[in-house]
Image: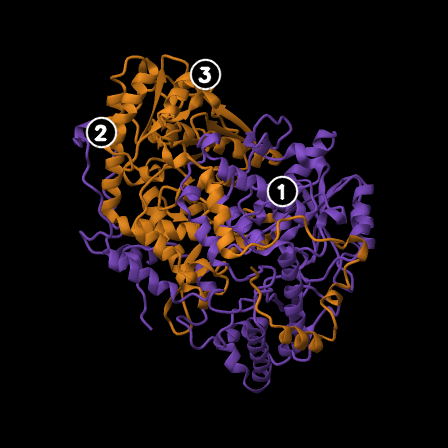
Chain colours: A orange, B purple
Amino acid sequence: MSYTSLSKKDLKDMMARIGVTSLEQLFKCIPDEIKCKKDLDIPPAKTEPELQRYFEKMSLRNTYSEYHSFLGAGAYSHYIPSVVDYLSSRGEFVSPYTPYQPEVSQGTLQVIFEFQTLICQLTGMDIANASLYDGASGVAEAVMMANRINRKNKALIAKTVHPEYRRVLRTYVKNLGIEVDEIGFAEDGRIDVDELEKKCDDKTTAVICQSPNFFGPVEDWRKISTIVHDRGAIMVAAVSEALSLGFLEPPGFLGADIVTGEGQSFGIPLSFGGPYLGFMACRKEFVRQFPGRIAGETTDIDGRRGFVLTLSTREQHIRRERATSNICTNQALCALRATIYLAALGREGLRELAGQNAYKARYARDKILQIPGVDLKFKGEFFNEFTIQLSGELKDITKKLTREKVIAGYELENEYPELKNCLLVCVTEMHSKEDIERLKDVLKSAVL
Amino acid sequence: MIREPLLFDISEKGKRGFRLPELDVPGDPSLLKGLPLRTEIEDFPQVSEVEVVRHFTRLSKTNYCVDEGLYPLGSCTMKYNPKINEVIASMKPISYIHPYAPEELSQGNLEILYVFERYLSEITGMDAASLQPSAGAQGELLGMMLIRACLEDHGDPRKTVLIPDSAHGTNPSSAHICGYGIKEIHSDGSGRIDIEDLKKNMTKEVAALMVTNPNTLGVFESDIKKITGIVHSNGGFVYMDGANMNALLGVCRPGDMDVDVLHLNLHKTFSTPHGGGGPGAGPVAVKSGLEPYLPLPVIKKDNGKIFCEYDRPKSVGKVRSFYGNFLVAVKALAYILSLGPKGLREVAEFAVLNSNYIRKSLDEHYHLQYETPSLHECVFSDKFQKELGVSNLDIAKRLIDYNVHPPTMSFPLIVHGALMIEPTETESKRDLDNFIQAMKEIAREAKENPTLLKEAPHQTYVRRLDETKAARNPVLKWEKKSDKNDRQT
């Protein structure tokens, strides 16, 4: 299948106007020695039905959907109302570029403005941007931003921050002279406050902590940010389960200076990891150091309200190497999905949904803990994820669970060798009471 | 036209657009004791489902998009986005899979990644690829990190990166995050890299040259082999910005130009929609010398089984969580498979034909700063119109009245008052002719009635917006009227 639209006659007419007799002549500027001498070694063209069959066949090798899964760990299964797919599939949203021409992009720009407002409401911060790639690069951008603000070079990140976020942070700042050190966790699964007190000093640019953290427990933002601010550092709050923001006291009310995280929970399918939705919000005094696109309100020459991309002197197309970030294309369509999702759920729906997650997770915890040989690893209060420790070998138990078509959670020992036989279990509104009871039954026979 | 209010202004207490099933487990608030619950978010939206649909549908109608017509935004390759690709990417057995799904339960998706990496390597003439970067800029950043890691491995990361003055702004920005200083290389009279300036600056301190080929003028760097030779003989690497790869598909390959690493923009060359600013994807392809440094994980195949390899001590780490923008890769793979080798070559041929047709049709009406033959895009300037007091911005805004999206104006910086036009291969002659006709009319209007241009656009939902006001007094979110008054005083 080809997606071009020129007839043979068009080709002839157009070549005549240009003054060439073959298409080959248009490429005269390319030296022969580097031209392809033969066709590319890829399969011949497929028609639409053939293409569909090819991918259907490929998808048969994905058997994940046959399993009852309790995987979370930074990517969450939530119900997506029909309006989200329906509206976000409109060509007027899907097929424009970044809104450089505001007169013909008001739809996209107003949505960004609404998205920014929602993120501010959820995080409790003053300003938000139009999106970043994902939660991981959000953390990296936050640290680079902190470094620009206070010119200090040591970043402290809690070990309870998502392992992928920590890894991306290290990769990003490695060449910028920013040193990254980690802070361990206490017995309740929360950041080790004593270690934070010890390590956080006047050379610290920022402390990054996540809540609910990677193991599930909710952190005490007030306590942490007091320590961080006492040493003159910037408090970066990371969030991997954005739904928690609709339920728990937001970090912006409790001392965070920058809040960043992953918005996938807001109407974006699991998608095997992407595209997702990085978000970032901060205090307004930091606006000049803020990365990424920002939409702002203004008026047109007739005095009507309109929106534009603004404060662009921070950005690469103007500031080049002195820009606040190299980001250009972001995740606009995912931000649109989140805006539609949050509009549909609304004030009451979001809260009710978050509540259902919390109640179901507690129901699951209580059921699972009835099994002999299963213990709650961390006692800290959690939202919709918690960590259990099994008395047997995790690998053997997982094998048995797989035979029963159950994935009980994320195996923490892969990233945390000290958490041997520990599973991070995530429960959302997608799990019915029966699903949870089945998890309990299957786990029980697997542990025995 | 209906003026669509903000979501927050149509909100009314008690409304909602979605209902959850009843909670089927105990829901006693005492169970949540110890959790720091927030009070309700007072101004959070409360709207019905119908209102949600009407709100976003009305907003969508104020957008111009590729589905509607020509979008000749230079260097952005705004081609038609095939609809079957969207259908495939939303197939639930592909899109509803958790990124931590065990490998044996997600072999289909891993195979998609594996196959796609191979095809990209073949198309670019490189040895390996990584699909992790989420967009072009992140691809650039990763590419430069790979170069740095390799140089460090050999004892000296070096200090500087050379970037031509015609480059896109992300190039210097990405190199900067990689810890490099930037040295700009001049263009010569033809708009190509000035070889003498390159030779002069290509010292042992230089880690890499970042070259866009064809460059942002649409001009092919015909001396590319000489250029890569100069950089390599001084121990540097050549990074190619593949934003303009649409011009080269099946015609020539960066690998055969001795490029060491490049990124591709799947949302440009490989037809995935731009979504009003993303998600895109910026895969990176490398020669074997840089392969050990690729980010984690690397997708491998053994005995028919696909697996992720993490044990790679020289890897730079990760630039993105999980596998990158996977569903964007799915769409791009579908595109490659639907076109095949002949179709891909036709993309380049027709893209270059369309651009040259526009160039030839307008060269009497608009100034061409560089006469050098160009490929997939052509860059005019507003020099003729400037004499009449009309700028490229006025021309662009007037084009909107003719129902065409304006061209790129913000770069290349070497052309003052640039109008960078890239029609892409998917456009029909009728649409090209309409565009050409509009541009000619505008050139005439500039002479006869410049005010018409200066006040354009005339028919849009909003007219020219006050960008200075937006930046000087930033209003970046909705606030309740009373709060707003407080703040403004």
Q: Where is the C terminus of chain A found, in terms of image quarters?
A: top left
Residue underneath mark 1: B118
Nearer to us of marks 3 and 1 is 1
Q: How many marks?
A: 3
Badge 1 and badge 2 in a common chain: yes
Mark 3: amino acid: Glu
What mark, if any, has residue B32 been given in the picture?
Answer: 2
Please tell me whether residue A416 is drawn above or below residue A133 in the rendered image: above
Q: Earlier in the sequence, mark 1 or mark 2?
A: 2
Q: Nearer the viewer, residue B303 or B329?
A: B303
Q: Where is the N terminus of chain A found, in terms of image quarters?
A: bottom right
Residue underneath mark 3: A418
**Residue occupying image coordinates x 43% and y 56%:** A295
Q: CA distance from mark 1 to mark 2?
A: 51 Å
Chain letter of the residue beneath label 2 in the structure image? B
Please tell me whether residue B310 is drawn above or below residue A251 in the rendered image: above
